[in-house]
Amino acid sequence: MTATVPREGQLWSRCGGCATLLYRKRLRRNLDVCPECGAHARLAAPERLLQLVDPGSFTVLPDRPAEIDPIGFVDLLPYPHRLTAARAGTGLAEAVVCGTATIGRHPCALAVMDFRFLGGSLGCVVGELITRAAERALTDGVPLVLVTASGGARMQEGALSLMQMATVSQAIAALREDGLLTVSVLTDPTYGGVAASFATNTDVVLAESGARMGFAGPRVIRQVTGRELPEGFQTADFLLRHGQVDMVVPRHALRGRLVALLAAARAGRRPASRPGVPRQEPSPLVARPADGQSAATPVGDAWETVRLARHPGRPTTLDYLETAFDGFVELHGDRLGADCPAVVGGLARLDGRPVMVIGHQKGHTTAELVGRNFGMASPAGHRKALRLMRLAARLGLPVVTLVDTPGADPGVSAEEQGQAAAIADNILALTVLPTPVVAVITGEGGSGGALALAVADRVLMLQHAVYSVISPEGCAAILWPDRGAAPQAARALRLTAPDLCRLGIVDDLVPEPAPGAHHDPEAAARALREAVLAHLLPLLDVPPATLVRRRRQRFRRFGAARLGARAGAR
Ligand SMILES: [Zn+2]
């Protein structure tokens, strides 16, 4: 059902569903839905807007996206060349169009993604523009409508693209606090980082007929599990059956549904209940240099670091709980039907102070690794983590997270149980958690699964850990001719601790005993303990509201304005 957007100027186009040759004008009159089989062809953002908003009501937001290439990414082509080609091919500046409009005379702010532009991937500019659309909704006191179409995060922008999941999520959290409706419309396809953040952590989630949404794509799941996928897997009807969307809406009914939702939200909203909207404080424009020791701590080649980060002898979360913390009391279960072995958590003491520790658990032997699903959390694992974070906040305990995962579980049942929404919920909850959070990337910080535990006041990283939007192997398989290019991809992705300190994603680097933590786990534990204490203690006296505000600023500053300024200075 993956019909392509018909190109302008063609008189006829062939339906991607039933292969019938259709007269273009007839197809366009039918909103690009095949009159023969009902297949919904993909829409470009401008066409989608024409279908949804009142004629002439759309005003594009004035922000012009910066030209950025934050990590100087090169695969077979430099990233700027791909951007230029995408601009020429779509006539758009980026993979999203944002603005204000009325729908059935109800004002709203909108962000409409366009899959034609680099697969609708979520880069810094896309994150920045959607965040500004959300901030505009907050300022105007109107609902936010997001129309998603995306293959996931934009790997050419490395871990900075991952940060956009948090940036947009906290803007959504602000709307939620202000009682403003947020609606997402899932269109085909919506995957990865977009699915695991603002596509699913809005108030109401509509899926257009035929749309597919999931955290992991079908190709990846087939590869990992070696299983054929069930009929209709990840389609709108599948999502409805598994409780992940509010409704499935055919395209011709979409505008009407939005009108009804906006009308209800407007009626329910008390007038004059809005004192001044708190403004974002201007983001600091300075690039953060690597802190103190970080600059001097040597880290080898990126691929060598990836191998060290995956070393089976590397201390696990349970090892650190044994050595760096005291009195660990493990708490189990998500209270919804499962206890995920890939995430462990509970109460512990750090230098005599009670803390909540939550981390991914791998293992040292094959049996342990299999038993812990290689540290790949299921939705139940993310929901257990969420339960423990909230418990910590209620008890006034700080949270320490230890991140070591190749990524979230990309299996069939994980998708059935709502992996994308589970990750999205954690990211959103962490952006507003009223207690200090310190995250430490101890081994592999893999993609959205890592970020689900790493939206924190301070993000630390072990010297030989890695943190990345995609595995080097996965990146190589997509952008290079073969997986053998993983070492090159590892270098291009800028996934080492010094790289991420320079980008401001990581605040401090925790030194490891040479040649790596596996060589002397006790020394590694002492270093981790000292680093966590050094960063946690100053946070304990900060009032919760200030803490949350600063945490938001921390993630807000990954927007493109700051990066554009820096890229210009390169
Ligand atoms: Zn058809």
Image (spheres, rainbow, N blue to C red):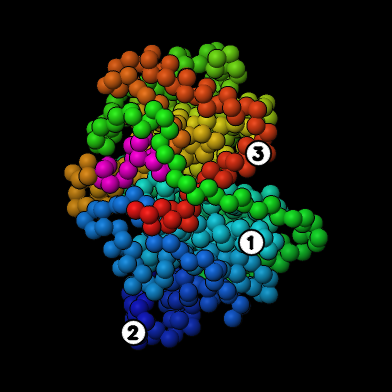
As drawn, the label of residue 240 is none
Report the front residue among 343 and 393. Answer: 393
Q: Residue at x 65, y 38 (%)?
A: 546
Location of residue 541 with respect to 20 vertically, above or below: above
Q: CA distance from mark 3 to mark 1?
A: 23 Å
User: Which residue in the structure is indicated by mark 1?
Assistant: 137
Q: Is residue 88 visible?
A: yes
Residue 348 percent location from the top left of the image: 56, 18
- The three-letter amino acid code for the residue at tag 3 is Thr
Report the amino acid beneath label 1: Ala
Q: Amino acid at mark 2?
A: Gln
- SS assignment at label 1: helix
- Along the line of sight, the residue nearer the viewer: 322 or 157: 157
Q: Residue at x 47, y 53 (%)?
A: 562
**Towards the viewer: 454 or 385:** 454
Q: Are marks 2 and 3 in contact (CB under 8 Å)?
A: no
Left or right of residue 56, residue 214 in this image = left
Of helix, strand and loop, which mostly describes the magenta segment?
helix
Give the magenta part as a residue range. Answer: 489-505
Distance, label 2 to label 3, CA atoms, is: 57 Å
Instruction: Please give the name of the residue rendered at 59% of the width and 41% of the height, measured from the top-left corner.
Output: 550
Instruction: List the residue tagged with mark 2.
Output: 10
Q: Secondary structure at mark 3?
A: helix
Q: Is residue 164 left or right of residue 223?
A: right
Q: Earlier in the sequence, mark 3 or mark 1?
A: 1
Mark closer to the observer (2, 3): 3
Q: Which residue is mark 3?
A: 546
Q: Is residue 500 magenta?
A: yes
Local crowd size for mark 1, using a 10 Å CA cut-off: few (<14), some (14–19), many (≥20): many
Give me the C-alpha separation between circle 1 and circle 2: 38 Å
Image coordinates of residue 98 in percent, x first then y, are 53, 66
